[in-house]
Amino acid sequence: MNVPAGIGLQIAATFFFALMSALVRMVADEVPSGEIVFARSFFGLVPVVVWLLWSGRMTGALATRQPLGHVVRGLVGVSAMWLSFAALAFIPLAEAVAFSYATPLVAVVLAALLLGERVPAYRWLVLAVGFSGIVIMLWPSFSHAAVGTGPGPLIGAGLALIGAVGAGFAITQVRHLTRTETSEAIVFYFSLVASLAGLATLPLGWVVPDGRVALILVGMGLAGGVGQICVTAAIRHAPASVVAPFNYALLLWATGFGIVLFGEWPEPLVVVGALVVVVAGLGLIWRERRPAPRIVASRLDPAAVSSGEDANRVGETGTDTPQSARDDAA
């Protein structure tokens, strides 16, 4: 364990993911989203494969017991990626990133509905607060459409929000895969499936990029791949519950890139809504990190105490922290 290194790697991951999104924003109006998805996935696979070979974990990345599960997870994940990239053609960078923070909240709901996991009452309260923040973020988009400035902001917000929901489904699938699959296998096969899915859109009409656009496409893939490596390494150096709160630095990087590169200042209501969602997410992480309540020994079955059975039941939540699951799904 090296907690400072884990935190530093997590912050580095947010920088590279924000850089990736900024590069997508640069070409979102010039390149079809399917071609962008292919570039992100294919070139993102390069640093991941190099890293796996260097660390001697390539064999673990190729071994799988659930090939079909990887295909399903890949298709769901690439759909969410496509929607989030498409949203960047309509809304500012920071706003698109802010909507992505709905993913951990959606994942909690889906874990209850699809995986049968028990969701304590406090989680539902946190979810209610988080979703109220999403409504606040959506309000400016409805307002712009109402005053006749065009449906663009509303379309972008809708794409970003649906993409966040799709990412929640991807997280649910990842949680299922982690029962038998390594994190290396999940990352490798997702990038592979996403690359093939993006390549399948070639007949729909790709553009031949000039030198500038080609460099941006390659750069976004490499940035995404390096970001994924940093996330995985961060969790190896420190518990996911420790590094997860630093994932919110992504919003700060995205806001900075948006202002410097595109002159995009986020709407005040979007900032307020994003802060509400962030507070809800941090509250959920903080609550998950609290130790399980202890039960008076006299009230436990002695046999269960000796076997550790009640220790597994007490405070059981049935799920990991939403943010750690989101990191695995990235």
Image (cartoon, rainbow, N blue to C red):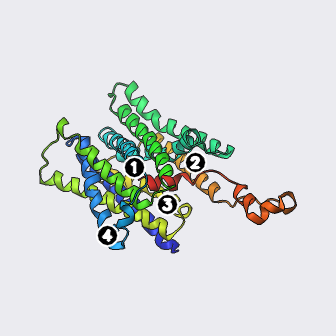
Pointers 4 and 2 in contact (C-beta within 8 Å): no
Marks 4 and 3 close (CB-CB < 8 Å): no
Which one is earlier in the sequence, the residue at label 1 or at label 4? 4
Query: How busy is the neighbourhood of tag 3: few (under 14 within 10 Å), some, or many (20 plus)?
Result: some
Residue located at (23% from left, 45% from top)? 199
Q: CA distance from mark 4 to mark 3?
A: 28 Å
Q: Of label 4 and label 3, which has the lower sequence position? A: 4
Give amino acid for label 3: Phe
Residue underneath mark 3: 246
Specify whether 67 is left or right of 289.
left
Residue 271 got which mark? none
Res 280 label:
2
Labels 3 and 2: the sequence-earlier one: 3
Residue 120 position by quadrant: top right
Quick one: 313 or 250, which is closer to the camera? Answer: 313
Location of mark 1 (residue): 70
Q: Secondary structure at mark 3?
A: helix
Q: Nearest the camera: 3 or 303? A: 303
Q: Nearer the viewer, mark 1 or mark 2?
A: 1
Label 1 to label 3, Cα distance in Å? Answer: 28 Å
